[in-house]
Amino acid sequence: MSSIFTKIINGEIPSYKIYEDDKTIAFLDIHPETKGHVLVVPKKEVDKIYDLDDADYDALMHTVKKLSKHMEDKLGARILWKVVGTDVPHAHVHIEPLDETWFHGRTLDLTENEFEEIRKNLEYHS
């Protein structure tokens, strides 16, 4: 069975996509911990990040680095990376702007308009 991320990659589930190339895709987390919380996902469905082959791992981390710099410029905030590996069985990296009001377990409740505004601001064009 395909992961929810594979369904997003295949266009079966809508997302607030900010970036895509031949090996990776990045979109807003629909349960964000901070405004601008992005997930970067390899298109190849592999459960654990350390089980990716070197080319897919390198592509994933290259996208994370590129988008982190882009987000820092757009949001004026320090960017955090998290690899959790327990919530969805498809390797991914969380990129989040630092928010001093963050606390463990917090999820923001954003409207579709807020998500779309954030998406437009963070959309990355090569």
Image (cartoon, grey):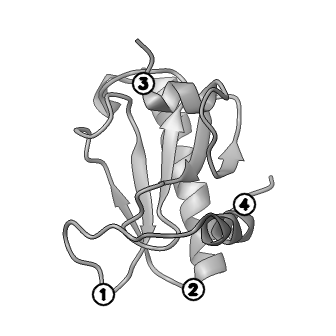
Asked whether 95 or 126 is in front, the reply is 95
Q: Please say if the residues under marks 2 and 4 sit with CB atoms less than 8 Å apart.
A: no
Q: Please say if the residues under marks 2 and 1 sit with CB atoms less than 8 Å apart.
A: no
Q: Image quadrant of residue 71?
A: bottom right
Q: What residue lies at 64% left-to-right and 78% top-to-bottom?
A: 73
Mark 2 lies on a secondary structure that is loop
Mark 4 lies on a secondary structure that is loop
| Residue at the right extreme, as displayed | 126
Mark 1 lies on a secondary structure that is loop
Q: Please say if the residues under marks 2 and 3 sit with CB atoms less than 8 Å apart.
A: no
| Horizontal arrangement in the rendering, residue 44 relative to residue 99 (left or right) | right
Question: Label 2: which residue?
Answer: 76
Residue 43's disc is: none
Separation (CA) of disc 4 from disc 1 = 25 Å
Q: Earlier in the sequence, mark 4 or mark 1?
A: 1
Residue 123's disc is: 4
Q: Earlier in the sequence, mark 2 or mark 1?
A: 2
Amino acid type, callout 4: Glu
Separation (CA) of disc 2 from disc 4 = 15 Å
Question: Label 3: which residue?
Answer: 3
Question: Label 1: which residue?
Answer: 101
Q: Please say if the residues under marks 4 and 1 sit with CB atoms less than 8 Å apart.
A: no
Q: Quarter of the image containing the N terminus?
A: top left
Q: Position of residue 40 (x, y in %)?
A: 51, 46
